[in-house]
Amino acid sequence: MRLINHYLPHYQFQEKHQLLTHATPAALLDTALRPEISEDPWTRRFIQLRELPDRVWGALGGRSGLQQQPAFGIQNFTPLGRDGDQEVAIGLVGKFWQADYGQVPIGNADTFAQFAEPGFAKLVLNFSAEAASDGSTWLRTETRVFCNDQTSLRRFTPYWWLIRPVSGLIRMRLLARIRNAALVE
């Protein structure tokens, strides 16, 4: 069973992207979660823009959930596991529609799997690698989000439609960065 299916078999939102590369599955998945891979200048700008109102509010003396936190990044995710050279998965739990993401710290994969508190969304992001018939490799990413009650679904839905185009661009850039780094290895 794929990790993404194990950790989030039911979901209301999904986004998939892929590219074909000559890098090996092992090199791709070894590279996928390295912190420097997600440090894309465009991604950083999009995150800064998303966080700007809350950070400015905090700088002006208002209550800010982000004021004492670094910018959102790969470090916010909980590692969920790796299945050899086929798949790696990471997860988040939070109220992503809030200015400060409303993230719940999740210590490990078991805690992620068991989390069921109402009012939150669970997100799994995976990277998978699969050999193509011509000897190249398909590098894929899939994002799934499950809102565990009507309130979280109602709050997350407009947020999803607002961020999805940028999220898709970030995922495509991330796939390209993984491919480029894996080819250098």
Image (cartoon, rainbow, N blue to C red):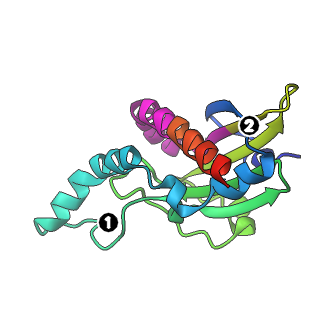
Q: Please, what secondary structure does the residue beneath circle 1 have?
A: loop
Left/right placement of residue 5 relative to residue 72 reads: right
Expressed as whole percent of the image width and height from the top left, the position of residue 99 reads: 33, 53
* Mark 1 crowdedness (10 Å alpha carbons): few <14, some 14-19, many ≥20: some
Asked whether residue 55 is in view, the answer is: yes
Sooner in the amino-acid sequence: mark 2 or mark 1: 2
Q: Which residue occupies the foreground of this view, 161 or 25? A: 25
> Residue sitting at 71 percent across and 49 percent down?
28
Q: Is residue 156 magenta?
A: yes
Residue 35 x %, y %? 54, 62
Q: Amino acid at mark 1?
A: Gly
Along the line of sight, the residue nearer the viewer: 73 or 11: 73
Q: Quadrant of residue 132?
A: top right
Q: Which residue is mark 1?
A: 65
In the drawing, does residue 87 fall left or right of residue 177? right
Which region of the structure is painted magenta?
Answer: 141-170
Position of residue 145 measured from the top left corner of the image (x, y, whole percent): 60, 42
Instruction: Answer whether labels 2 and 1 touch (C-beta < 8 Å).
Output: no
Q: From the viewer's side, name the closer residue of 65 and 83.
A: 83
Which-is-in-front pick, marks 2 and 1?
Answer: 2
Q: Residue at x 66, y 31 (%)?
A: 18
Please name the amino acid that badge 2 sits on.
Answer: His
- Element assignment for label 2: loop
**Residue 181 painted magenta:** no
Q: Which mark is residue 22?
A: 2
How far across and down, in percent of the image, does residue 62 sit?
16, 66
Looking at the image, the residue that sits furthest to the front is 184
Q: Residue furthest top?
A: 134
Image side of residue 132 versus residue 91, left or right: right
From mark 2 to mark 1, how far is it between C-alphas? 43 Å
